[in-house]
Structure formats: C-alpha cells, structure tokens
Amino acid sequence: MKSIISVILIAVLSFALGLYLPWWSIAIAAFIVTALIHQRPGPAFLTGFIAIFLTWALLAFVIDMRNQHILSKKLAQLLPLGGSSFLLILITGLVGGLVGGLSAMSGSYLKKIR
C-alpha cells in the first residue's frame, strides 16, 4: 500500500513542480516523498522509477499526439532510432525514471541514516 501511495504522490508532485520549476524538480519530488514515506531502498527505487517513467512517458505521448508526431519523428531520425517516435517516448520515460528512481533511493537512504 505504501508503494501505491508513493507512486501517486511522486507522480502528482513531480507534475505540479514541473509546471513551475526546471525538469530536475522531479528529483526533488521523489526525494521528498520517499523521505517522508519510508521504504527500503529497492522498493523506493522502483516507486520513484515507475512514477516518473509513467508521468514523463504520458506527457511525452500527449505532446507527441498534439503535434501529429512531427517533432518526434524528426528527432528520432537525428538519433539512431530509425524515425520511431515510440522509441523516443520510451527513452524519454527511461531517462526520467532513472532520475526519479535514484532520487527516491537517496531519500530512502537519508531516512535510514537518521
């Protein structure tokens, strides 16, 4: 139950902070939520990763749908992705997920030290 609540809180807080702060505010959201709702480091990493992965992938998908895949296909051609906008959205989610997961794990370790 802690994990589900943490995923929802991290996703909502990271989305809200992302509206007003730079992209790395997702790390602050994952860190704060995991420091307040204590979990072991492994599950904390998973909750942070899942929350930010889903948030960023969903946001990237919505933005991609709004402009009919124009920008994502051009960017996917520049990168070695073969013009696949799906792979670009997946990589976007993975990068955000890693940042969120590592930040959440750091918050878990902070709580462990106290």
Image (cartoon, rainbow, N blue to C red):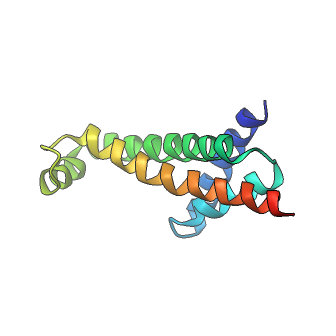
Residue 102 in which image quadrant: bottom right
Residue that appears at 47% across and 48% down: 56
Looking at the image, can residue 42 be seen?
yes
Residue that appears at 49% across and 44% down: 53
State the quadrant of the C terminus: bottom right
Q: Is residue 75 left or right of residue 42?
A: left
Q: How many numbered marks appear?
A: 0
Q: Position of residue 52 (x, y in %)?
A: 55, 47
Name of the residue lying farthest toward the top: 1
Looking at the image, can residue 66 be seen?
no
Name of the residue lying farthest toward the bottom: 22
Residue 44 in which image quadrant: top right
Q: Report the front residue among 20 and 88.
A: 88
Q: Position of residue 70 (x, y in %)?
A: 20, 48
Name of the residue lying farthest toward the right: 114
Q: Position of residue 30 (x, y in %)?
A: 66, 55
Above or below — where is 12 with respect to 29?
above
State the quadrant of the N terminus: top right
Residue that appears at 46% across and 40% down: 58
Q: Is residue 61 left or right of residue 43?
A: left
Q: Is residue 85 left or right of residue 13?
A: left
Q: Position of residue 43 (x, y in %)?
A: 67, 40
Above or below — where is 43 with respect to 106?
above
Q: Is residue 40 left or right of residue 11?
A: right
Residue that appears at 52% across and 57% down: 99
Q: Report the front residue among 63 and 45.
A: 45
